[in-house]
Image (cartoon, rainbow, N blue to C red):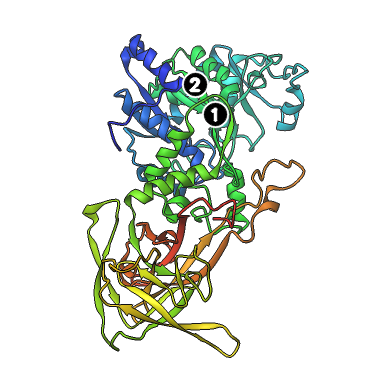
Amino acid sequence: MSEAKERPNDFIRQMVAADVAAGKHGGRVQTRFPPEPNGYLQIGHAKAICLNFEIAREFGGKCNLRFDDTNPEKESDEFVQSIQRDINWLGYQWDKLCYASDYFEQLFQWAVQLIESGDAYVDDLSFEEMREYRGSITEAGKHSPYRDRPVAESLDLFQRMRAGEFEDGAKVLRAKIDMAHPNMNMRDPVMYRIKRMHHHRVGDAWCIYPSYDFTHGQSDSLEEVTHSLCSLEFEDHRPLYDWFIEKLGIFPSKQTEFSRLNMTYTVVSKRKLRALVEGDYVDGWDDPRMPTLSGMRRRGYPPAAVRNFCEKVGITKVPSTSDIALLEHAVRDELNRIAGRRMAVLDPLEIELTNWSEGEVLELDGINNPEDASAGTRKIPFGKRIFIEQEDFREEANRKFFRLKKGGEVRLRHAYIIKCDEVIKDADGKIVKLLCSVDLDTLNKNPEDRKVKGVIHWVSADHALEAKVRMFDRLFSVEKPEADKDRDFLEFVNPESLTETTALCEPSLAELPVGETCQFERIGYFCPDNKLSAPGAPVFNRTVALRDSWGKAGN
């Protein structure tokens, strides 16, 4: 990542700059990225990752990766490992790897401290009763009958909760705040619940688990995080975040919220992404149609493009939805600069070169990347029979058609100018072959007596690699699949979001490394699938078209 890039100037960076200038926390900057390991990271997480790691870099600070693993029901080591891979793929490395579960004993002792100070109590109400007692945004809640339980009794019960004496859900530990507070999160929130579930790291050592709200701020405090950056859905939780830190008298981490990243024609909620996976609407969390980072990596998105997109979207407090075309523009822009060029034909039409000797094969030099001279050249076999795209030939065409037509000429990329002399058709009148002649004096040079404007790609018929190609359309058929509250978003899954075809490719594509995206000239950008490809037998995913075609035929 370039250090010379101009620093963005959003409200969070302005805040951090002011804190550093004022010498707050000794001018130190410590951030963190704190995902729950209950799913794969998606494009919205990329925005948070870039923000936290870039702010640490820009201000000479540090950024931790912390897993907020307080709910073992859907957490797993699979997600822990995938999250680390995704962050590394984006180009970042954390200063410390932390887990909220590392702090379980300290959190328990802090809970004891709050009971002793009269700021927490053990409650016997069921979850249904607590919901009833909580009130509403227009009606104050009611005190639990156990709210004034003696401190000694709550301490004893809390220790026995930890020892496993009670059934799941029989008791909880709650903060004692204000049941009439206008912020519902402050109405005696649950701090601990009994849940006998195997934890991916600590096993069965605990049968009580702290809530997210009781864990998050204190974990920030333990790591002395100076700037705790969260998305806007946590704004209503900030008073509780501050309340716990103040009551415990610990390091005063500060939470600041920014708008989350939403995109058209997709969903980013982990719950909804999980529904897509578990309902077999997609082929796993890393399906190339998914907005997950692993899906984008499998599709061939370069990490720099994702970073550039996140920077372009920017950091604000105003919720908004970004057009998926903006992300694809960033991908296209980056790939145009870095991707190698290759030739492949998706809808082949055979050409026989009548004045080329049978069995003669010429190794032509193909430029790997016209944007990067250091990328060099490759050898492309050229023989008597080649394939071109069906759409690059018309038997009859007007003057504005600059590709091949009967009696007309066209240049073959990296090769010669050819002329169509005869069209061969089958009994039904379908064109099956073209007979063309080669101007042997036009290899990499133009004829002096005429202009030939058109240039098309091709592959040698005798050397072509046959490969499966997967083409992707939008995952959803509507721009905002969550907008209709009366319908399940799954109803809008696009059944045509994945189609497969076969391509005839130049032989060098057999050796394209998995994870490397190249341009099929005049068609789009493609990447060997990291699950389906085998040595010498790639399966290609289309990363993105050469230009924005959403408004026409889909992408």
Nearer to the camera, 266 or 163: 266
The residue singled out by tag 2 in the image is 256
Whether pointer 2 and pointer 1 mark residues with C-beta atoms closer than 8 Å, the reply is: no
Q: Residue furthest front?
A: 449
Considering only vertical position in the picture, is 117 above or below 467?
above
Q: Residue furthest top?
A: 22
Q: Residue furthest bottom?
A: 427
Query: What amino acid is at disc 2?
Result: Thr
The residue singled out by tag 1 in the image is 259
Task: Work out how far the residue at label 2 is from the one at label 1, CA to CA, in angstroms.
Answer: 11 Å
Q: Residue at x 66, y 16 (%)?
A: 149
Please tell me the numbered disc located at residue 282: none
Find residue 366 and report its horizontal and vertical position in percent: 27, 65
Is 317 placed left or right of 85 in the picture? right
Residue 354 position by quadrant: bottom left
Number of numbered discs on residues: 2
Nearer to the camera, 506 or 116: 506
Find residue 377 and report its horizontal and vertical position in percent: 23, 62
Q: Residue at x 72, y 48 (%)?
A: 488
Local SS, label 2: strand
Residue density around tag 2, few if under 14, some if 14–19, many if 20 or more, within 10 Å: some
Quadrant in which the C terminus appears:
bottom right
Local SS, label 1: loop
Considering only vertical position in the picture, is 397 above or below 526?
below
Q: Residue at x 48, y 34 (%)?
A: 313
Residue density around tag 1, few if under 14, some if 14–19, many if 20 or more, within 10 Å: some
Query: What amino acid is at disc 1?
Result: Ser
